[in-house]
Amino acid sequence: MNTVKMFIAVALLIILQILDADVMAQIKSGTFTVAPHAGWYVFDQDQDIANAPLHGIGLGYNFTPHIGIEGTMSHVNSDATPSDDNRNLYIYRVDAMYHFLSDREFVPYIAAGIGALSLHSEINGTDTNGLINYGAGLKTFITERLTIRADIRHIIDYDDSYNNFACTLGLTYFFGAKDRTEALPAPPMDSDGDGVPDDLDMCPGTPLGVAVDSAGCPVDSDGDGVPDYLDKCPGTPPGLLVDEEGCPVQRKEEVSVELRVEFEFDSSKVRDIYRKQLNEVTRFLKTYPETTAVIEGHTCSIGTEAYNLNLSRRRAESVMQYLTDDGIDPVRMKAVAYGESAPIADNSTEEGRRLNRRVTSVISTIVINVIKK
């Protein structure tokens, strides 16, 4: 008991002497720790041992600011109940620890580990059993290297299935981590003032005020090879060829679709075999909505000239009506009748006359395409 009282008195004296110090501390990687502690030990009721003060010391190492390991030895001096048989309990533990908020003044932690309980009595001698334990605690920095520490543990004697508890208050002293107090080197040269040192600057001489990347080169957000401060077409899609101002290079191209529908003798009815071709014309006109079409009607030479002129007009209008029914505005189309005046084959043969009974149109437009790299 005198040892515990002396420990508490020394701890309080240290605390009172350093409470006025400014605390700028954190748990650091590579630090060793020494942790004296004292507190109260609660025995399982089935052990018939009186609860008693506890004191001890721990030695540890912090692999990272969050993860550490600690070996602890503690001693409890008590008496059996109801007899006065003196009992000395020695507790040996190796625990893994995890610190939360390791860079703050108050650092909560959890811990768990294994070890051994060695109980010595005057009558029964020494009995040693294995233990497992877990718990939590709080470390409070009072200097850069010293914390006050409160801890509670559930200690399980897994040989005899006893459940004990230890509540302690102590100190933890950190040592071994190197303090980085060396003088700061002179700032590196940055001739063009872009924030990137000359020895790392891949684009020296960048104009002042221009945004640069980590290599000191002007930022090119769309990756077209023209920096943002010169790019007059920001947001160019990748893969396109651009000019010196960052705008896509364009090329004019003519696109067209050809229509040719043949008719039976003295008929203006569109046959089903031409529906696929007419649907392609419809798609073209819808794709290029500014395009117009001239639908040209023709006949063979059989019949009078006046009759054939009228027949050719009806054929052109029949094709035009098909396209209108398919969604094309008739304003965009014009039917022109040629009658028998523009044959493409010899009207003295059946084959020639078949070829001349037709409606034709070549529909074209100019499109502007961007060029890919």
Image: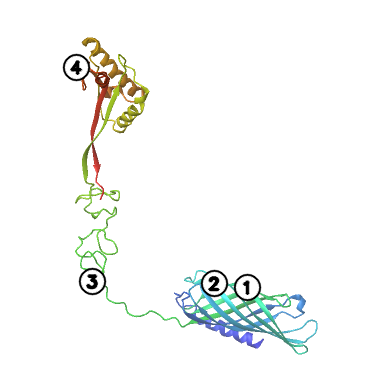
What residue is disc 3 on?
A: 189
> SS of the residue at dot 4?
loop
Look at label 1 and name its amino acid.
Answer: Tyr
What residue is disc 2 on?
A: 98
Camera-side residue: 324 or 193?
Answer: 324
Residue 189 in picture, x, y percent from top left: 23, 71
Is disc 1 in contact with disc 4, using a CB cutoff of under 8 Å? no
Task: Let me know if residue 15 appears in the view.
Answer: no
- Dot 3 or dot 2: first in sequence order is 2
Residue 254, by quadrant, is top left
Residue 329 in picture, x, y percent from top left: 31, 24
Q: Which mark is residue 373?
A: none
Q: Compute the Cα span from label 1 to label 3.
A: 55 Å
Disc 4 crowd rating (10 Å Cα; few below 14, some 14-19, many 20+) is some
Camera-side residue: 284 or 145?
Answer: 284
Residue 255 against residue 24 in the figure, above or below: above
Camera-side residue: 270 or 367?
Answer: 270
> Left or right of 196: which side holds 120?
right
Disc 3 crowd rating (10 Å Cα; few below 14, some 14-19, many 20+) is few
> Left or right of 326: which side holds 155?
right
Look at label 2 and name its amino acid.
Answer: Tyr
